[in-house]
Every structure is written in structure tokens, then in C-alpha cells.
Image: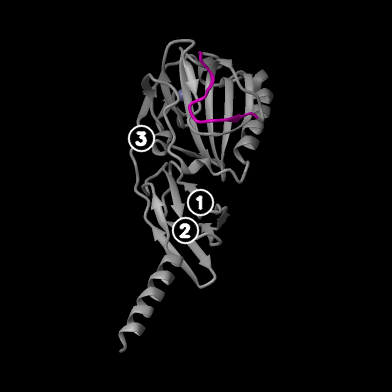
Amino acid sequence: MDSKIIKLSIIFFLLFFKANAVEFNGKFIQGHFILGKTSPNSLIKIDDKKVKVSKEGFFVFGLDRDRKFDVTISVTNSNSNKKIIKKVLKRKYKIQRIDGLDEKKVTPPEEVYNRIKKENNKIGKARSINSDLDFFKNKFIMPVDGIISGVYGSQRILNGKPKWPHYGIDIAAKQGTEIKASGSGIVTMSEGDLYYTGGTIIMDHGHGISTIYSHLEKLMVKVGDKIEQGEIIGTVGSTGRSTGPHLDFRVNWFQTRLDPMSIMN
Ligand SMILES: [Zn+2]
């Protein structure tokens, strides 16, 4: 073969390969955040869900705490259609059993059921926003300096009843400690007094990635504010159902709750 033809076919192969390449930043482990990059204009599906691809080719998704099956990532562009299958590694979560508790402390009183339902709907709406922002592609930071007193995925079994797993990380810090925005984004909720989470801020970082800051003493932002990473959004408190000053920090990919540690690494 003519060396020119060989060269041309190598170039063609490289171009073709590049057009099909998909890179992942993140580990395929339960609860993890995964950032993907592909060629712009590709269509990406995670399992059966179509996800947004940014102008630069970034997309994002997350794996549920208890996900037991493989993830299928379908990549379609003008010259190909392929499926990537990834195994999801399982994790062991902390389980704590406490028996002999006063029943009133285990279940909320009936008169607050409606309030809780309304508040959960509001939170769910904020988490379902699918904006074009692409701040999710930048590394996130710890919102407060403090001691991690609660980890993602842990679960308490009170009087034999399994409670909701803990989906955030708890960072113990002094009352009034300033809280920084973990990533740049737009404030989608700022509520002073929710039943469980007290003073609560939700931020949208794009493509379904949101962060939640709970039990705040002071809220310093309002819905619609554009916030840069590191900006002060409020202060640590112990509002809502909380036993002492701390920040409960959460990350979601739509309704899937992710381990906040996985977006900071
Ligand atoms: Zn917490």
C-alpha cells in the first residue's frame, strides 16, 4: 500500500475513533456521581433515560444507593450507535439498631403529615429541574469546614422499623459557621422552616444535578440568585429535626440521591 493511503487511513481511523469515544470520570459504585464526555451532538441514554449533552459534550448521571444491576450507556451519533455496559460495585452501609424508644420519637405526629407531604412535593419539584447549566462538570468543594458526623447511606432501625437511609453527609460545625456554595449554580429553593430540614437551600447545577443544604440558621440567598462556587449562602444551625448544630449536605441526580463525597473527588 502507498504510504499516503496508510497515513490517510490512520487519520481517518483516529477521527472516527474520536467521534465515538466516551470518557467517564467517576467510579461505577453504588451512590456515585459520574461525569461523561463524548462528542457534541451525540445522543446519550442512561438505561432508558435520555440525558442532556452540553455543547462541549459533557453529560452526567448518578447511581442509586441500592442499585443492583449494570448500567447501560447508549451512545448514538451520525456514524454509529453503541452500547456500553458497566458493572456497579456494591457497598456496605452502616446499620444501627435502637430499640425501646418512645414511639412518639419514631413516627412524626399525624397533624404534621400534610405539611410534610407538601414540603416533600416542593423539594421533589426543585430536584426534577433539567436545566442547560453545565456547572456540574467542575469539581465541587466542601461547603463547611467541620467534622463529618454522619455518612451517606447509613440507616437506623428504630424499634424494629427501618427508617429512611441517610442520604447526606452531616458536617458538625459551630452555630453560625458560614456555609459556602459547593458549586456554582442557581438557587431553586430557599425556605426558612421545613419540618425535617429547617432552613433549607437547594441549588441547581445543571442536567438534573442539585445540592441541598439543611438545618440552616440564616439563609442569605433567594430563589433565582446566581451563585458562584465558594460564595456564602447561609450559616450553620440546628433548625428542623436536628439534635445539634450541623450542616446536612446532599446531592441529587433528579430523584436519585448520591453520595456527596463522590462529587468532591
Ligand atoms: Zn443529616
Residues 257 and 38: in front is 38
Q: Which residues are magenta?
A: 225-237
- The amino acid type of the residue labelled 2 equals Thr
Ranked by sequence position, the earlier of labels 3 and 1 is 1
Quick one: label 1, few (<14), some, or many (20+) residues within 10 Å? Answer: many
Residues 158 and 81: in front is 81
What mark, if any, has residue 38 been given in the picture? 2
Quick one: label 2, few (<14), some, or many (20+) residues within 10 Å? Answer: many
What mark, if any, has residue 29 been given in the picture? none
- The amino acid type of the residue labelled 3 equals Tyr
Quarter of the image with the C terminus is top left
Please state the horizontal and vertical placement of residue 261, each as a whole percent of the image. 39, 34
* Local SS, label 1: strand
Name the residue beneath numbered marker 1: 59
Residue at the image point whose x is 42% and y is 65% from the top: 18
Q: Can I make out residue 43 in this image?
A: yes
Q: Is mark 3 within 8 Å of ligand 1?
A: no
The reply to whether dot 2 and dot 1 touch (C-beta < 8 Å) is yes
Please say if 143 is above or below 38. Answer: above
Please say if 95 is above or below 242. Answer: below
Residue 17 location, quadrant:
bottom left
Discs 3/1, front: 1
The reply to whether dot 3 and dot 1 touch (C-beta < 8 Å) is no
Name the residue beneath numbered marker 3: 93
The reply to whether dot 3 and dot 2 touch (C-beta < 8 Å) is no
User: Would residue 235 be counted in the magenta stretch?
Assistant: yes
Please state the horizontal and vertical placement of residue 105, each as a whole percent of the image. 51, 16
Please say if 248 is above or below 242. Answer: below
Discs 3/2, front: 2
Q: How far, Cα to Cα, is label 3 from label 2?
A: 33 Å
